[in-house]
């Protein structure tokens, strides 16, 4: 080692060794700047922001138009909430919460979403636990059926359910019950897949430990397994609600009349005629309701997982 290198402080030599050889090259030329892997990702950041603007800008414009004081869908004429719950002078019964047609469709959308959510998720959780207990070729066939609903186009599901209720299951009339049965049938696959993935990550050690400590199989599932599955169950609730509230194809085929058409179908029907900002308000309501359920799910997920981490840390401290 030369005297010059030996005379340098050890900290400086360490910093020089930490600098990558490519970063030490000159980046003054365009070719050197391009070859430098440690450069700032200006191109990637620009493409990302352009994509976000392209995706979100139309949505933000549609939301803003729902608060327009005029009838136009393209010209901003001032802020107003008259298209939500007021009585616009252009159309006294055209507001979202005032119009009998839109109000009934809104109630139908919420009814189908909550009923589907509270029926499909418990069924899916029970089905996922049952699949994990099966032995033999049955679980593989059940998994294929769950994944098959994601592959098959929704229009085929809608037509198939329409023919099924029309020619075979005739005692279930088209309308709310037919829509609910159809939605639950293919929405149950969401909790099955999500909960099964959670079960594979948990393993069977916790249930076996509970049974070794004297718990019955039912108590082990209720007091040990289900609390560990709460995050997956919450995610299933959010996904089922978000996918159901704006469903269009299935509920449109199975609608029994104007009174059973949800908000998504009403938006489509109104968009074929003269548009008013009330339609933007209806679409904004669908978006906001999904965001509210998602934020509520994230809040509960953090509360539950933080509690589980705290209990795990207490158990680890007790054992050590």
Image (cartoon, rainbow, N blue to C red):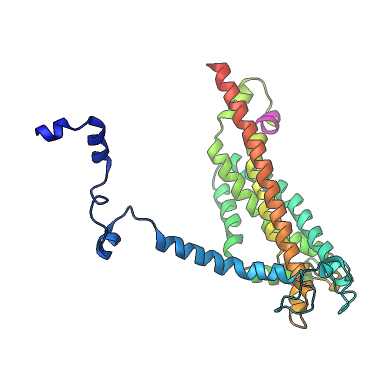
Residue 90 drawn above or below residue 263: below
Q: Nearer the viewer, residue 252 or 265?
A: 265
Instruction: Say which quarter of the image contains residue 163.
Output: bottom right
Residue 102 drawn above or below residue 39: below
Q: Residue at x 79, y 59 (%)?
A: 110
Q: Main secondary structure of the magenta part?
A: helix
Residue 212, percent from left and from top? 61, 21
Q: Residue at x 52, y 16 (%)?
A: 320
Residue 258 drawn above or below residue 201: below
Residue 197, percent from left and from top? 56, 45
Q: Is residue 47 visible?
A: yes
Q: Nearer the viewer, residue 299 or 90?
A: 90
Residue 191, percent from left and from top? 65, 49
Residue 19 part of the magenta segment: no
- Number of marks in picture: 0
Q: Which image quarter is the N terminus in?
A: top left
Residue 88, percent from left and from top? 87, 74
Q: Magenta residues?
A: 219-224
Q: Is residue 174 visible?
A: no
Q: Nearer the viewer, residue 269 or 285?
A: 285
């Amino acid at each position: 080692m030369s005297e010059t290198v030996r005379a340098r402080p050890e900290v400086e030599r360490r910093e020089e060794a930490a600098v990558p050889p490519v970063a030490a090259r000159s980046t003054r030329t365009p070719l050197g700047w391009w070859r430098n892997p440690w450069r700032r990702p200006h191109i990637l950041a620009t493409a990302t922001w352009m994509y976000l603007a392209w995706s979100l800008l139309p949505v933000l414009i549609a939301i803003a138009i729902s608060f327009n004081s005029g009838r136009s869908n393209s010209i901003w004429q001032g802020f107003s909430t008259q298209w939500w719950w007021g009585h616009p002078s252009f159309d006294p019964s055209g507001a979202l919460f005032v119009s009998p047609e839109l109000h009934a469709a809104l109630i139908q959308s919420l009814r189908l979403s909550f009923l589907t959510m509270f029926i499909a998720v418990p069924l899916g959780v029970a089905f996922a636990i049952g699949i994990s207990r099966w032995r033999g070729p049955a679980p593989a066939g059940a998994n294929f059926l769950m994944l098959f609903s994601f592959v098959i186009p929704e229009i085929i599901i809608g037509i198939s359910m329409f023919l099924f209720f029309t020619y075979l299951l005739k005692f279930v009339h088209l309308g709310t019950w037919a829509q609910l049965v159809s939605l639950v049938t293919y929405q149950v696959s969401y909790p099955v897949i999500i909960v099964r993935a959670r079960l594979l990550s948990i393993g069977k050690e916790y249930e076996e430990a509970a049974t070794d400590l004297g718990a019955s199989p039912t108590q082990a599932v209720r007091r040990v397994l289900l609390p560990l599955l709460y995050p997956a169950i919450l995610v299933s609730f959010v996904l089922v609600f978000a996918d159901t509230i704006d469903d269009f194809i299935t509920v449109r085929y199975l609608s029994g009349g104007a009174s059973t058409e949800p908000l998504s179908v009403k938006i489509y029907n109104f968009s074929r005629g003269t548009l008013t900002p009330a339609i933007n308000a209806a679409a904004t309501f669908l978006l906001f309701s999904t965001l509210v359920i998602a934020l509520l799910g994230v809040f509960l997920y953090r509360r539950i997982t933080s509690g589980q981490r705290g209990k795990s840390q207490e158990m680890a401290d007790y054992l050590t």
